[in-house]
Image (tube, grey):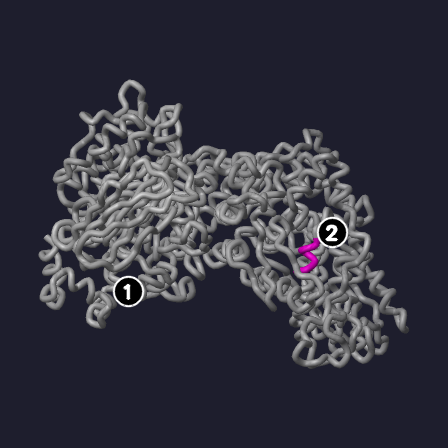
Amino acid sequence: MKRRSFLKAGSAATVAFGAYKARALAESPLLGALRRRGNTNDHILVIIQLNGGNDGINTLIPLDQYSNLSKARTSVLIPDTKVAALKGYSGTGIHPSLTGLKNLFDDGLVSAVQAVGYPQPNFSHFRSTDIWMSGSDSKETWATGWMGRYLDQRFPGFPEDYPNTDMPDPLGIQIGNAVSLTFMGPNANMGMVLSSVDAFYDLVAGGDSSGSTPSTPAEEELAYLRMLASQTNAFTDVVKAAAGKGKNLSTKYPGGNNLADQLKIVAKLIDGGMKTPVYMVSLGGFDTHAQQVDTSDTSKGSHANLMKTLGDAIAAFQDDLQLLGHADRVAGMTFSEFGRRIKDNASNGTDHGAAAPLFVFGTGVQAGIIGKNPEIASTVTVNDNVPMQFDFRQVYASVLQDWFELSASEVKAAMGDKDFDTLPIFKSNPAGLDDYLDLVSRISLSEPYPNPAGDTAQIRLSSDGGNVRLELFDAMGRQVRVLYQARVAPGEMAVDVDLRGLPSGNYVLQLAQGPKRESRILTKR
Amino acid sequence: MPELNPPAVQRRTNTNLDAYTGSFGRSEVLHLLRRTLFGFDFAQVKSFESKTLEQAVDTLLTAPSSAPTPPLNNYSLRTNDPNVAFGDTWVNAPFDVNFENQRKYSLKAWLFQQTQTKTNSLHEKMSLFWHHHFATETLVVNLAVNSYAHHTLLRTHAFGNFKSFVRAITIDSAMLDYLNGRLNTKRAPDENYARELQELFTLGKGADSLYTEDDVKAMARVLTGWTINFLNKPYNSAFVATNHDSNDKLFSSFYGNAILKGQIGSSGGDKELDDLLNIIFAKDTVIAKHICRKLYRMFVYYDISSDEETKIIEPLAQYFIDQGWEIKPVLKKLFMSEHFFDNLNRSCIIKDPISHLAGFLIQTKPEYPTNDVDTEYSIYQLGRYYGELIQLDLGDPPNVSGWQAWYQTPLYHRTWMNADTFPKRNQFCDFLLYVGYVKNGYKFMIDVVDVALQTSNPSSADDLIADLTQWMLAMPLTSAKIAELKAILLPGGIPDYNWSDAWYAANDPANSEHTSQLAAVKSKLQGLLKTITNLAEYQLS
């Protein structure tokens, strides 16, 4: 599959060297030039924000951990008989209400990335959202967003002299709420905000669509001002024109689904010819501290409703894009500020957690799951979390490099002058998911010994060579130590695990090589 | 473009000038303050809530006890002004052709500075009303000191006696310069001022204002000889008897065929001016109605139907006359009337540019530098310049008629808003909320946490939004819009305690999450205040 996609990408040089070597060549002038040509490609990213912290464990369900999971999750766990299967992945299931996304996965249109987070998780909605939107470390506070920095590179000087003939359209469009940090650039916010689905239709209709007739002088002045406001936004005309020209062809858009309503607008604007490269939509309600599931049937309830809303909206959107003929230009990506705790709480819900799966969909992705199911300990305490397997900024770097086709230096600049390894999310990534999993890299991790341990333990790791990293996470999902990091020769080696100064409890030892992850649970006495 | 039709809504006001006897609660306080001040902070709302309506209006009608610090030399950092040290006032300095323009811009910045004084007095807004009514242009008037004296005159008479005001304006140096009165001599009479004195300053051009061209000519002759003493400081007006036409002047039947006895000698100018004013002010009803209509359009609503003409303008005009042209009682009567508080008259004024700009700054209180005239004046200049961009350039009305939005039928206040000015109004707020103005290393920017701290319970998202929207918006929002605002603070329907927790951490430097939560709180408050100030409702008063 990987090689086919490279043929499609049309680069003879990369085919000749093969996928693995192409990765090493990624920074060569030739590839840099190829990428630069693509920096102005017509690709579109649609970011779907899941507000509140989505319960990743009930979304992408680690069936191979089910017995430990059923001990940890006594009230919200979905019966394994009801968990929906994912084609080709017997150890991992998906929420039965997320059918829309499951079908796309089975059709080869979804890349699921396991346990995406960052090394020192923050459990505040605000803080963690800011971290995700800005792309900063958890100890840093950045004033710009990752898309704002990207768009600033691509459209320098904005908003001075914009819109113009080269870029007549908004750089980013956000449906719902206020301007978000995601689009904040160094000079200005790059996103045009349509505060709600209604606001979009008001704009297209040229005024207040509420239909109420002014009955007082104040209401009449207000109507005048609103009409004027809708007509004076710099981008009103182009949005109106695109909305007038664009179509929706899918009959799958469900009623009463606000996310679907938002995505329907996005599809219409794309079809209408907007050059806008980034859209952001959102769905709220994921902060499921209480009544996440129905007590009588845990596959139903508020989280199940959200899963259905999400899956149905994405399925309709993808269907629409395919019917409209834009599917190859559009990729979607979900994110949520954090996942939720492994153990459920006493209110039939789950509390703020750490890493969680993230989905990228579209015809441009390498279908499959990147990473492993999270390891669930046999005894899970109330604060235990899923540790990250992948930094969310690896996903961002992959989007920038492989979807928007930025050069390595451009990606680095957009990421705030930091390097992140890309993941085989997109077909255009130099490495193939299959290559990594089956051909290039084989890693394994022994059971740590002793376990439970005192101040020290030992673990054996094996690989067929390359850069490996062994990290220690505590039960809260915080990266405590990097135990080993080096370029190694093929073979097996032993690594000492120093637990001195650490409190007793569960820890996760995680071995990483490229996008490959292995982990073991180690308990300190 | 939007339809530019006059209002279709018929106001069916049943209210008149009778004293308002309803409750004087928060919404009445807000209505009164919105109409009488450029802006007000939340503490002012609370302080006025403890007053009766009469106490509130009396407070508003109390002029500041002292005159403001005069404009300063903010311009000679590069080129030395030999007569004025940097940071000193130039208003007593001799004319200097090299510095007049810089002094004029210093004066214009100073005019914006005056709008920034936190005040409980209508005096500031009335000063702008008179700047509009007795319009002069700083950049047209030759001497900066004359324009300064003109604005001092406006401030002195703002709450005074209208007839005395007209007299003072007639021989005000800036006005003599601006409308060519200084060139009006018996050999070459100039009718410019004589026309505007009637058409704009006193009688107006309504159906009842029937002065004739001959009256204009006669009036110009009365005023011959008045000029400016450009030779000596303080460049005041002077009467040159040899330039004065001392013949008798005959007026039309509109003025009862009055004959003004010509006077000779150095006191002739004063004497004839007094007589002239008596002749003009004999048309008391015409004058009083003209002024009352202008006040009504600035403070109540621009649309005056025959109903308002009969129920409000006519009796208010009569009261003006009965009070011997005293301005204050008229304002008191208007602001205490049931008509002023009529629901149909609330929230229907589109803010003038200064009420938008100065009002926003008074609400959000970015801190001005101290002991740094250069930086301080550059900030006033920024406000002044934004005013120019959105069509109210302090010190320089478009012409002698003042600003169109306050007189031009049928659009009136809607004139302020168009495809260019509306976005710029928003940009001003966005700029100071998100970026800030930097000069000499000083950053003039809104501290959004301080804005929230003004309200009664900022740790509660609901209370914060309720206070901010009530205080800053003249119309209540729908529950859906309120929910949108709340989602800025609490995205995705997360529970309210998330905002409270973040707020407390942001306000507690000892909290381990202080720095990061402060950043989160700030960005959310920026978003909230941007959204509120960009709403159409924010443009209403």
A233 horizontally vs A38: left or right: right
C-alpha separation, residue under disc 2 versus residue under disc 1: 63 Å
Range of the magenta residues? B112-117
Please determine whether, in this image, residue A321 is positioned above or below residue B89. above
Point 77% across, 79% down: residue: B83
Q: Where's residue A395, x and y in %?
A: 28, 52
List x then y, in percent, for residue A416. Answer: 38, 60
- Is residue A279 or residue B476 the one in the foreground? A279
Q: Residues within 10 Å of mark 2 (few under 14, many from 20)?
A: many
Q: Residue at x 20, y 27 (%)?
A: A80
Residue of label 1: A408
Residue A400: mark:
none
**Residue A459 included in the magenta stretch of the image:** no
Evaluate whether residue A309 shows in this view. Answer: no
Q: Is residue B522 visible?
A: yes
Query: Which amino acid type corresponds to the residue marked 1 in the rendered image?
Result: Ala
Secondary structure beneath label 1: helix
Give the quadrant of the C terminus of chain A. top left
Residue at the top extreme of this rendering:
A296
**Label at residue B123:** 2
Please indicate whether residue A497 sits to the left or right of residue B523 in the image: left
Residue kind at label 2, given as amino acid type: His
Question: The disc numbered 1 marks a residue on which chain?
Answer: A
Which residue occupies the foreground of this view, A230 or B77? B77
User: Percent x, y for residue B243?
Assistant: 81, 77
Q: Secondary structure at mark 2?
A: helix
Residue at point 51% right, 55% down?
Answer: B434
